Amino acid sequence: MKLRKNRYGVVGNPVSHSLSPDIHSEFAKQTKRALTYEKILCDADEFNSTLNLFFNSGGEGLNITVPYKGLAAEWVDSLAGHAQKTRVVNTVVKRENGFEGYNTDGIGLMRDLKNKGVRLKGERVLVLGAGGAATGIIPQIANESPELLRIANRTLEKAKILSSSMSSLFPEKDISALAIGQLHETFDVVINATSAGIDGKRLPIAQEVVKTAFCYDLFYSQNRSTLTPFCSWATKSGAEGISDGLGMLVEQAAEAFYLWTGDRPSGAEALKRLETKLS
Ligand code: ATR
């Protein structure tokens, strides 16, 4: 008898570069589960029908990547955790009474920072960017009780809107916005959540800003011997430490896998294998 494999996948555009199938197949091995995990490319106007078709034909759970994390929040029947406020969804979980949207990016980032010995409690934290990626991680960062949290964006207005919605979510925290070009203070942790690196663009930031900081780039380089543009700039600027977002990718996937299956795989083990495969 042929074993029925549970179907999972990731929906995005573009999606061909996604490492999620490798990561989830590693988790499946670890937890001895039979599953398939596919990359699903669609246009924005096909997003709803793509999800309907996937689940109507037996799909069990989906990850959602750029640029559809906002559309996913509209598609689900309910939102869980911080996704209720941010409306940025990267994981869809099938429940008995409908589909529930989660965001596991923030948890993934926190776990990866912890794995690297970086704590945010009592620290001065700067997030660069005010788009979907920044919105998805900021509630988790605020939860860690940093001394202060600054959101800097090229378009100041967007940073202000995000900062004020996060301040109303966390009224007791010191959260404020500024324009990237206005940055002069120093920070302990700087997180790049802009998409500038995708087209190799450099952010207009003074080197002093990252001199005493651990710099984390949400983006990652598939070529492990090449730094992302942000990590490369941070290194040249004298940052105390750097990391790209491969570990976060693995840890957000581990949380999604747990939500879907109830099994908690080892992110650290999967990351080791992925690093070896990519190098
Ligand atoms: P994502 O879902 O990846 O966050 P997004 O919502 O389009 O994508 O947001 C992209 C972020 O990267 C924004 O904060 C954007 O700044 P603006 O709000 O000013 O557009 C930022 N960004 C993109 N390219 C940039 C560049 N070359 N320099 C500075 N910031 C940039």
Image (cartoon, helix red, strand yellow):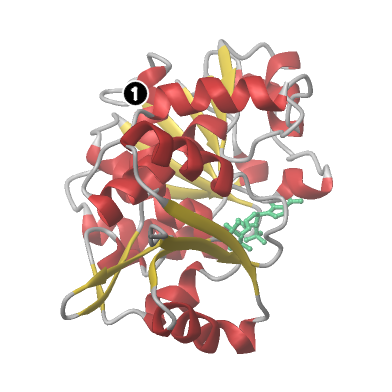
Q: State the residue at coordinates (64%, 50%).
A: 18
Quadrant assignment for the N terminus: bottom left
Q: State the residue at coordinates (40%, 79%).
A: 55
* Residue 228 sits above or below residue 165 on the image: above
* Residue 98 sits above or below residue 267 on the image: below
> Label 1 is placed on what type of residue?
Glu
| Residue nearest the viewer, comparing 228 with 65 | 65
Q: State the residue at coordinates (70%, 32%).
A: 230
| Residue nearest the viewer, comparing 247 with 261 | 261
Image-based side of 142 in relation to 91, left or right: left
Within the image, what quadrant is residue 273 found in? top right
Q: Is residue 123 visible?
A: yes
| Residue nearest the viewer, comparing 184 with 138 | 138
Q: Position of residue 106 (x, y in %)?
A: 37, 45
Residue that mark 1 sits on: 123
Question: How many neighbours does mark 1 have within 10 angstroms: few (below 14), some (14-19), or many (20 or more)?
Answer: some
Image-based side of 261 in relation to 3, left or right: left
Q: Position of residue 183 (x, y in %)?
A: 59, 36
Q: Secondary structure at mark 1?
A: loop
